[in-house]
Amino acid sequence: MRNVVAVLNQKGGVGKTTTVINIGAYLAKAGKSVLIIDFDPQGNATSGLGLDKHAPVANIYEVVSGKTTIDNAIQTTTIDGLYICMANANLAAAEVELASSNSKEFVLKKALSGVEYDYILIDCPPSLGLLTVNALCASAWLLIPVQAEYYALEGLTQLLDVMQRVKQGPNPDLQLLGVVATMYDNRNSLAQQVYKELQQYFGDSLFKSIVPRNVRLAEAPSYGKAIMEHDKWSKGAKAYKQLTKEVISRVS
């Protein structure tokens, strides 16, 4: 499962879900088959693609709790080639239930075995709990969105430490796909300073594409649309289109 990508930052509000939705959309536009796993109990990837997270259909909670298979829980979206396994608040219960199961860190990996997509993107919860560990054990790659603001670098060391522990233990194949700066305002000297620190710390692991602060990008989820559907000429759309090209290049 070499093209499974976990998108993670335990700090909320950094553009994690926006990154999942829009990379997924542009991958699909490039002719790839893409499955998004909404693995966050907030279900923002689900609602951000215009689906009702409270709809009476199978979702990822029922998959990891063994009540159904992943094939029964995959929904179509308005974008050809882009599919999603939805989530809602019920997923929070899985954290407790998984704790008592055998091979508790491999439940998601087992659920995804045999699933054939060009890319699988996992929208992780903003925490470093058992759901996140499951996502890291199921993935070949880790992508970290980082907000270009003062507290951005806080917690990154802890996140990278968790990645190393997973790499040294249950998933030695896990690799850092890259770090992407989000919500960047080039008029802000602090944002420029944070970006320079990211460059120094991550070097070539930092994506060249920078996601700007962009009103059209921020409002797209309220319409249940990816940015390419909402305003394909916006700065946010151009940034995610370019970032997706980098993702394809790095994975290849």
Image: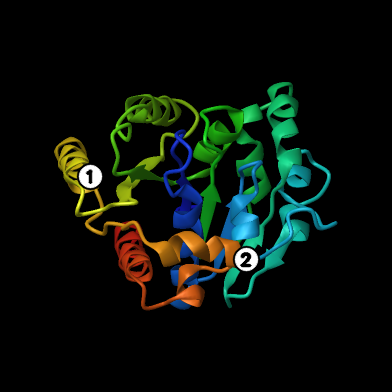
Tell me if residue 117 can be seen: no
Q: Quadrant of residue 159?
A: top left
Secondary structure of the residue carrying tag 2 is strand
Residue beneath disc 2: 83
Residue lying farthest to the top in this orientation = 100
Are the residues flagged by discs 1 and 2 in contact, CB closer than 8 Å?
no
Q: Is residue 215 above or below residue 105?
A: below
Q: Amino acid at mark 2?
A: Tyr
Q: Residue at x 32, y 65 (%)?
A: 239
Q: Nearer the viewer, residue 72 or 25?
A: 25
**Label 1: few (<14), some (14–19) or many (≥20) C-alpha neighbours in 10 Å:** many
> Residue 6, position in %: x, y?
48, 46
Secondary structure of the residue carrying tag 1 is helix
Q: Is residue 120 left or right of residue 194?
A: right
Q: Is residue 120 above or below residue 220?
A: above
Q: Quadrant of residue 251?
A: bottom left
Q: Quadrant of residue 146?
A: top left
**Label 2: few (<14), some (14–19) or many (≥20) C-alpha neighbours in 10 Å:** many
Q: Residue at x 48, y 56 (%)?
A: 18
Tell me if residue 143 can be seen: yes
Q: Earlier in the sequence, mark 1 or mark 2?
A: 2
> Residue 14, position in %: x, y?
42, 44
Q: Is residue 78 left or right of residue 146?
A: right
Residue beneath disc 1: 191
Q: Amino acid at mark 1?
A: Ala
Q: Give me the C-alpha separation between circle 1 and circle 2.
A: 34 Å
Q: Is residue 226 above or below residue 92?
A: below
> Residue 26, position in %: x, y?
44, 70
